[in-house]
Amino acid sequence: MPTDLITPVLTKGIGELNLRDIKVYQEQGGYEQLRRAIVELSPKEVADICNGSNLRGRGGAGFPTGRKWSFLPKDAKTRYMVCNCDEAEPGTFKDHMLLEETPHQIIEGILIGAYAIGCEHAYIYIRGEFKRGYEIMRDAVAQARDAGFLGDNIFGTGKRLEFTIHRGAGAYICGEETGLLNSLEGKRGEPRLKPPFPAIKGLYGEPTVVNNVETLAYLPYIMRNGPEWFANVGPQRSPGYKVVSISGHVAKPGNYEVALGTTIRQLIYDCAGGLRPGRKFMGVQPGGGSSACLFEEHLDVSYDFDSVTKAGSMLGSGAMVVFDDTTDFVKAAYALIRFFSHESCGQCTPCREGGHWIQKTLERILDGRGVDSDIDVIKSAAHQLTGLNLCALGDSIEPFLASVITRYEDQFRAYIKKPAEKVAV
Amino acid sequence: MSATVSQTGSASQADLVTLTIDGVEVRVPKGTLVVEAAKTIHTDIPVYCYHEKLGPAGLCRICLVEIEGMPKLQIACNTPVADGMKVHTQNPRVDDGRRAILEFFLLNHPLDCPICDKGGECDLQDYAMAWGQGSSRMIEPKTAKPKAVDLGPTIVLDEERCIVCQRCVRFDDIITREDSLRTDDRGAHTIIATATGKPYVSDFTGNVTELCPVGALTSKTYRFRSRPWDNHRTTTSCTQCSVGCQMHVDERGNTLLRTMSVTEDDAISDSWLCDRGRYNIGFVNDERRITTPLLKQDGAWVQIDWDDALALWASKIKAAIAAGGPSRIGAIGGGRLLNEEALLAATLHRALGVENLDHRVGGQMLAHHAGFSNHVDVENANTIITLGRPPSELAPVLDLRVRKAVARNGARLISVGDHYANSFVPETHATNADELRAAIGENPGHVVQIWDGVAIEGGPELTAPMFELPSATRVDRYVIPETPNGRGAEALGMLPRDGGLNALQMFEAARDGKLDVLGILGANPVLRFPDRALVEEALRAAPFVVVTDLFLTETAEFANLVLPVCSAFEKSGTTTDFAGDVLPVIGSVLPPEGILADGDIIVDLAERLGVALPLPDELEAKIRELVRTPPPAPVPYYTRATAAAPDGALRVIPHESVFTGGGTLAFDTTIAELHATPRASIHRATARALDLADGDVVDVAGANGQMVRALAVHVDERVAEGAVALLQGVVGAPLNALGIAPHVRLHKALVTA
């Protein structure tokens, strides 16, 4: 594996050092940038550094972080910073690892972000299933509090920064930022009607920024190395480093931190060790379960927000799922549709009804009871439910399904033609 | 063609936005939603989850429109207008979007329209006819969900018909603030449920059946009873309390079927009805209604005809005047009559020289306030102060405005004195003048005061801060009359003047043999007057008592002559609400044969007594004039004691429920489940001191040995320590049986298995 592709920033030291220990983290320069921000810089100067780095959100939407912050009303008295650690996108496991291995850089990132937006109370919303991660974060926060990095008088400046850890209860939809805010408030985890956006009316009705774990974790390094260090890596409009979760039919699945702009081929073959011996590449989801499948002809696409979008998919949370020629794409599509149908909060008609309809139809196809019209109906139903929902969950149903039906329609047809008794599900 | 709407009433030219909808230029205030802008040119955009009073939710997606320049179809319910915006509500692309949404809605909908109560007035049916595709492409079995779910005492829910628009959930959240409905499960399995699995209990449940755009939520009293196209509709004012909500009444074959809110009625009801007004209609057809005049002979009722009955009453009046003058005659009631009837009754008696007139039977001091205001001002107040029993108990729909003021408009709610409970919004409780002064603060803004009209011991001292407000402060004072038309009856003459006796004095005079004829017009003092024993003694002692009522109530049982009368659904006229509005009451059904209206009886009696009454066409102007010139404040005949009780005894805090009372409620079996259960509510500390627990059964003993038996103990932190809150007007457990003595003792009842 050519090591020059892999550029550890957030992942540096993982597997070698016990970064959960605040002393070890501090020996690596940890909390130094928080101190610098709070003691030496104004919130605006910190925000300017972030802006200069062209950092885009690592949670899925790829929205420029500095711009997101800039939407907060200038005169707001109370503002909230919420770190989204409800990582549940199929194929994504980067925040999970960062949470368990490097909790302090997350805390430092959150606190720097909170300071930059003028927030005195930050939250981290941790996926309910991450019990171990929650315990690690809890201990890390206690260490940081003992060290005086949060509380009523940070670094003796008299500045106040509170920090609350909140565990989710197991719903994918709570990763959607307004669903997360409702859940954090103790309500049912349902996305809110927008506008108003969280920047205007978020947690408890106050202006709020919700940022992904990885996004915030890059802040200390951008502060340390300067915004140009980040901005000059990779494509100009989509710069910097990214932890990519690679899974599926590869020799060495795992998290790989690379510069954006690395090609999909390099990620699969150079980082993740390529396919298993003798297998043929059939497709890859470049950005988690919500992204459309890319194929052979896309292998040399640059892995950055804009290029992957241009290729017809999305970078999303940076989770690649690789499929070789052992893949049953009907079952793969069914697994994802069942997931989205199960995780639909049930508010919007198209997502609630449409997803379930497609799921039931795929079940029947897999059961050997498909009919010829099914394929057109599925495509049409998936298409007509897209773009009509409050949040993006409903819009996640069509991309993968449509891309693999178009490419591997024969696999779907095969199920429909097979007599029922011969199909094993 | 162009249309302009002014929602705020003061939108200047600069605040107007010009857009086109289907090619028609529309000018509306900035911030108007596209769905509302379309209404100004009478273009209806279909909606399910959106509702004018609930605002946008963005869930159902049926209101899709095309806006030029936007790649996707947009929801009209959450898109504000913009200058130059070009909206299309009718074109193939929009039609296809709506077709797609309707296909999703109908995938798992049971399509049981032939047996669904909503059939004929169902938005799903209507929109499916307009935009639906006629058949489903789904060949899977439909998802099964619970059917005929018993949601509570009033509502049945069909989860399969539900389209999860969440209007009911949002009504319960935004409007009533009671937070008892929610969605359960998720995705395609989402259902409507109660918050804790408990029954859906609220004073406003019926509204969700109207908000429901499909047949999912249905009223138990109306299920499977009629088809909307067979109903005949009349619009009237509700006469169950003094709010006077505008209300549609649906009738078929002279049988009342249901009442519905008037959605355009922003001024009075804000388009809601309480469950008392909505559901308490079954009494009209109750078989216990009296249908002929009844005369008591040797302790038994004898049916007599109207001519004999009225001749008898007239002769008793003549004889009384001849023997001792008009001061030996008295009349009580009027607050449950129409304005016209109250005016005629007062006019007749005054023409005879009778000044012993009083509409007050429940202990209230007065039913009007000095000024005139309206309902809407309540929700625009900055500070709302309630004195005595709160509007949530006495005027439920008014309380929705209080909740709106506090929860949505940022008003402060202050309750004064030791009443039992206020509402479902945060409040500050002030038990003395200093606390009240502090609660009001330096800058109270627009103050609204809502009083139950009952004088209390130490009242002037307690409420003094109310009268120390800066002179520029706007104060609107409201009194909630104890009867639906109390304000009208008071203004129209049913109050003693020139030395006439008030209700208390009349009962005392009757007891002492100083009153020969007592007319009780649509009132039930045996159940409602603060001292039941006195009323019973008085009615026994009076030589001739005549009562007009629908039923043999507690009071009618004591009469010599009972005259059967029309309900408010069987006669027409006007009523006066607490704010002084004169509202129409329009009859919707014919009364049972042989029944007259109170007004007809008074007119007939006047003829027999040779008194000329105003003619019908003179009444309206006279009523409007008199209602606008309220009489001087009367002197209270009852003052509620507030002093602390001696050791071992408890101070009584009388309170009210929407579902208490003797007449229309006690004789309505269709809503038996809703009748308030009498209970003794005490603070936890009181319970501990008396060794009582929630659910224990107690007997309540008055100061002179009177008893009200077998009340369940209800532990409630909102009741002051050392006090017990007892429901008024409950037939089985009349609080007034304990007399006016302010203190009672609780004894654990011996419960037999």
Image (tube, coloured by chain):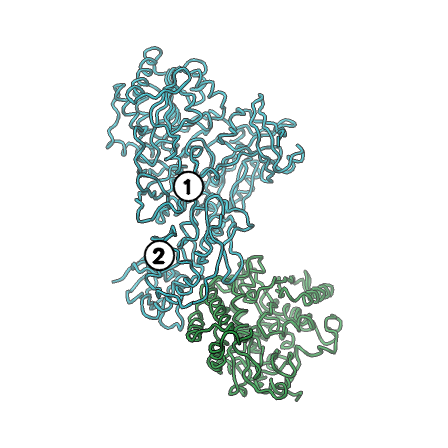
Tally of marks: 2
Q: Quadrant of residue B627?
A: top left
Q: Is residue B613 left or right of residue B47?
A: left
Instruction: Give the secondary structure at mark 1.
Output: helix
Q: Quadrant of residue B633?
A: top left
Instruction: Give the secondary structure at mark 2.
Output: loop
Residue A285, position in %: x, y?
A: 55, 79
Q: Is residue B84 visible?
A: no
Q: Nearer the viewer, mark 1 or mark 2?
A: 1
Q: In the figure, the cyan chain has which letter?
A: B
Where is mark 2, residue-wise?
B11
Q: Quadrant of residue B136?
A: bottom left
For the C terminus of chain B, the image quarter is: top right
First in sequence: mark 1 vs mark 2: 2
Q: Amino acid at mark 2?
A: Ala
Q: In the figure, the green chain has which letter?
A: A
Q: Is residue A394 visible?
A: yes
Q: Is residue B416 left or right of residue B67?
A: right
Residue B54, position in %: x, y?
A: 43, 54
Rendered image: mark on residue B551:
none
Q: Chain of mark 1?
A: B
Q: Chain of mark 2?
A: B
Residue A82, position in %: x, y?
A: 59, 65
